[in-house]
Image: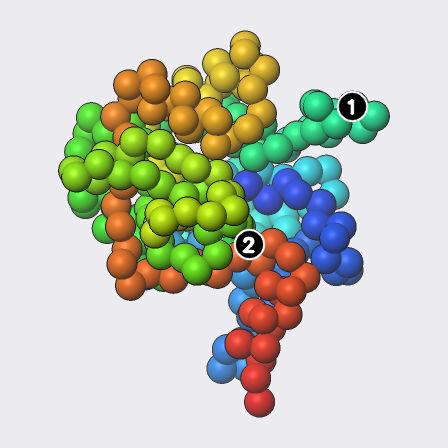
Amino acid sequence: MEELIGLIPAAGKGVRLGLPYPKELFPIIHDNKYKPVSQYIFESMLEAEIKHVVLVINETKHQLIRYFGSGQRFNTNISYAVQESRNENDDSTSPGLADALNSAYHLVKGKTVCFGMADTIISPKDLFKKMLEKSNKDDDLILGLFPTKTPEKFGMIKLDDNNKIVSIVDKPEKTELKFMWGVIIWRPKFTEFLKESVEIKGQSDFADILNNAIKAKLNCKGIIFENGTYTDLGTFDELMKLYKKYHAP
């Protein structure tokens, strides 16, 4: 039986939002109960009975550690991997998503990884469970796909007739493609591919790495959630829309 592990990158500093706390702790109030936005993707992983979740953080995310702790109160185990800052005067080596994911290599090596972003709210809640049920053991990469009206903000997916991924078009200005990727499940072959891409080849663009994995003949599959939703908390405008949605009188 494959060993599952959740992976949630939360190392961004979020300075554009101007919040006095990490954006991953942005409050969602429902029935007078507080839940941070990052808990939504976390709970989606728990729906798949994942018993170990890794949060990738930077050296300033003390509040995030304080909230999630060891994971005991969520009936799971939480580990923290630190994405170290690089030379601030060299933009070419700025840490990005690929580097953040690879920062957890020592914890995810040899396991089946369920990856989602900390600043998103996605439905259905049990999407990881459904993706695992629909995948085969020889699928190296399984992308959860969602419809979007703003393709210019996301990685858009070109599929063949069998829902195998042909390519990823990142943030196109114009496209007829309908589905973006929102979450990914990958197996050890891609973990090693990612490590080699980042550490040996010096690649930093995650979309390029995914496309290179497709070209390298890794088994890449898309699972479409036709009625699924994907809400991103990446900008101040999106934060305000989310605030109004959950805090409307």
- Which residue lies under the disc numbered 2? 119
Direction top: furthest residue: 200
- The kind of residue tagged 2 is Asp
- Which residue lies under the disc numbered 1? 90
Residue 107 seen in this snapshot: no
- Which residue is depicted at the point 41% across and 21% down? 212
Q: What element does badge 1 sit on?
A: loop
Sequence order check, earlier mark of 1 and 2: 1
**Residue at mark 1 to residue at mark 2: CA–CA distance:** 26 Å
- The kind of residue tagged 1 is Asp
- Which residue is depicted at the point 27% across and 58% down? 226
Observer-nearest of 185 and 182: 182
Residue 56 seen in this snapshot: yes
Above or below: residue 212 compared with residue 22 = above
- Which residue is depicted at the point 66% across and 43% down? 12
- Which residue is depicted at the point 59% across and 77% down? 244
Give residue 13's mark. none
